[in-house]
Amino acid sequence: MSLLEWRDEFRIGIAEVDHEHQVLIGLINELHAALGADRSGESVEDFLGEIHARVSAHFALEEKDMQARRYTEFETHKADHERLLDDIRDIMDEHSESGVLDDQAFANRLAAWFGGHFKTYDARLHSFLQAQR
Ligand SMILES: [Fe+2]
């Protein structure tokens, strides 16, 4: 089973962006499938580190676009990105203390953030970018 199922509430209605978000979630699921039952500390650390890196790369592209187009909501949008990256960091810290990763809790935290961010920050940003074309 996938770690994170695509949900209708993730959809913002701009095909290109929805596709990118589906790819990101697919990537997270692939990393999770590759981790499988291997719960050695190092493997879980690598898994979380890789997710942090991929999500961060996705955000960096979006932030580059925002800056290039002088998007007025850049600071608050970026702050919401930082909030998820900090959350992933916290999960990494929790894991290194407890030695345990609760997959379901991790998935729920990601899904809650995606569900909130895509529909608000990303929907506003991408309709702004589209209007400029
Ligand atoms: Fe975003």
Image (cartoon, rainbow, N blue to C red):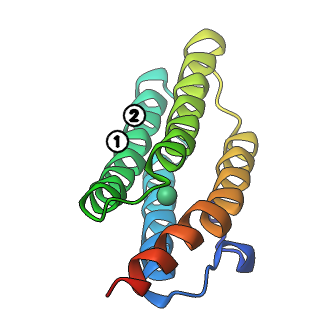
Q: Decide which of 37, 98 is in the foreground and name it.
A: 98
**The N terminus lies in quadrant:** bottom right
102, above or below 100, in the image: below
Q: Are marks 2 and 1 in contact (CB under 8 Å)?
A: yes
- Provide the residue designation for mark 2: 49
Instruction: Report x, y in % for residue 100.
Output: 65, 24
Instruction: Report x, y in % for residue 78.
Output: 46, 44
Total label count?
A: 2
- The three-letter code of the residue at mark 2 reads Gly
Q: Within the image, what quadrant is residue 3 found in?
A: bottom right
Seen at 60% across and 32% down, the residue is: 87
Q: Decide which of 107, 85 is in the foreground and name it.
A: 85
37, above or below 27, in the image: above
Where disc 1 sits, the SS reads helix
Disc assigned to residue 53: 1
**The C terminus lies in quadrant:** bottom left
Seen at 39% across and 52% down, the residue is: 59
